[in-house]
Image: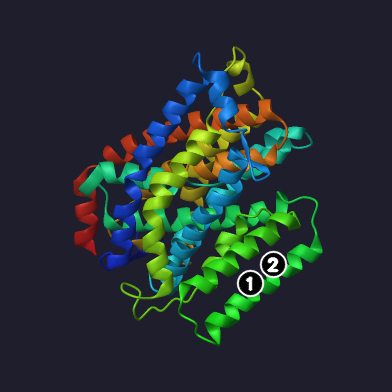
Amino acid sequence: MATPETTKTVRSPLSSSFQWFFDSEKASGLVLIACTALSLLLANSSHAADYLALWQVHVAGLSLVHWINDALMAIFFLLIGLELERELYSGELSSLQNALLPLVAALGGIVTPALIHYTLNAGTPGQAGIGIPMATDIAFALGALALLGARVPASLKVFVVAFAVIDDLCAIVIIAVFYSSGLSFAYLAAALAVWLLLVAMNRWLRWMALLPYLLGGALMWFLLLKSGVHATLAGVMLAFAIPYSSQDADQSSPSHRLEEWLHKPVAFLILPLFALANTAIAVGGQWMQELASSNSLGIMLGLLLGKPLGVSLICYLAVAVGLCRLPADLTWRHIVGAGLLGGIGFTMSIFISNLAFAGAAPVIDASKIAVLLASTLAGLLGFFWLRAIPQSISQASSLRA
């Protein structure tokens, strides 16, 4: 049996597409922090009533917060799907050997927090929040790694992004399976028919113009909205219908062009709007007691304890039995640090909080406070843990490779 100490593999330099993705993502974390702080400040100021009422203004039948969460976030999920498609076809996940370690890390980082939350909430109304501590926020995790600069190996950036993207994909599946209600199979069948038509346009007709796919995606979003399945799933479905070519991934494929166009609007408009609308939390005098609830404890322990434990232990076991290998420039200290950064739930965790306790505003607010506190602590712990690792350790690992 292989041992974790001997199963090392050399990782090639970062691809240009991955480096571009890393550079374009890391700045949005600071914007999200600023928007969250501003939203919390306004929601607890003398202007709180007007600020909270702003997000409930109805436009074309939906409130502003619903337009953000159901429509704009579909564009966010489209970007996540495009990123995943690129990584699977020609990026860091295109090799099974490279993909296995972040894949098992993602599974450990999903199952362990869910088990912790379920243990504390089984059979109670809080059980609906089991999906909240499962996700990882890519922008914040990359922001922390960017602040560390050259102190962290290149393979760690790849590892964190890969398991965070897989986390998000699993969160999307969880939303589809567990947080859909009042299903209309006619609308759902129509949405699937539109998606199959778009796939046929790509696979067999090889239509390379983006406009027909975007129009089809908008129709698919409307049909899913009516079907009872969360409409944001249309974004991911559309991503895998848009033509992608690994030969021209860095130049002209429709998928790559759209991904490049979407990064700035998503990072600097959609996600900040999401943060402003969804962290407008009026913190009452009972917030400390609310944090002691089984649901809030499950969220915080899931993110702070479940993520690093799940990621580290399952990776160690997978390497020990020879299922996958640890990159040569990484140590187990790096994996633990990555697991800590995985506890930054933020965007997806807040998103799932809205779905898990729809109609129960006090529970949603308590869940969001738990997410914000746990994500902040996880980010700080991960940053200082990785910062404390001597650079000589990574250099020695690379020389041994």
Q: Amino acid at mark 2?
A: Ala
Q: Amino acid at mark 1?
A: Trp
Please state the horizontal and vertical placement of residue 131, each as a whole percent of the image: 63, 45
Q: Quadrant of the C terminus?
A: bottom left
Whether tag 2 and tag 1 are in contact, CB under 8 A, the answer is yes
Please state the horizontal and vertical placement of residue 89, each as a whole percent of the image: 43, 74
- Residue at point 67%, 53% (across, down): 230
Q: Which mark is residue 195?
A: 1
Please state the horizontal and vertical placement of residue 171, each as a whole percent of the image: 59, 52
- Residue at point 48%, 37% (across, down): 275
Callout 2: few (<14), some (14-19), or many (20+) C-alpha neighbours within 10 Å?
Answer: many
Horizontal relation, residue 130 to residue 50: left or right: right
Tag 2's secondary structure? Answer: helix
Foreground: 380 or 233?
Answer: 233
Foreground: 113 or 84?
Answer: 84
The residue under label 2 is: 191
Q: Residue furthest front?
A: 60
- Residue at point 52%, 22% (across, down): 43
9 in relation to 300, above or below: below
- Where residue 298 sits, quadrant-wise, is top right
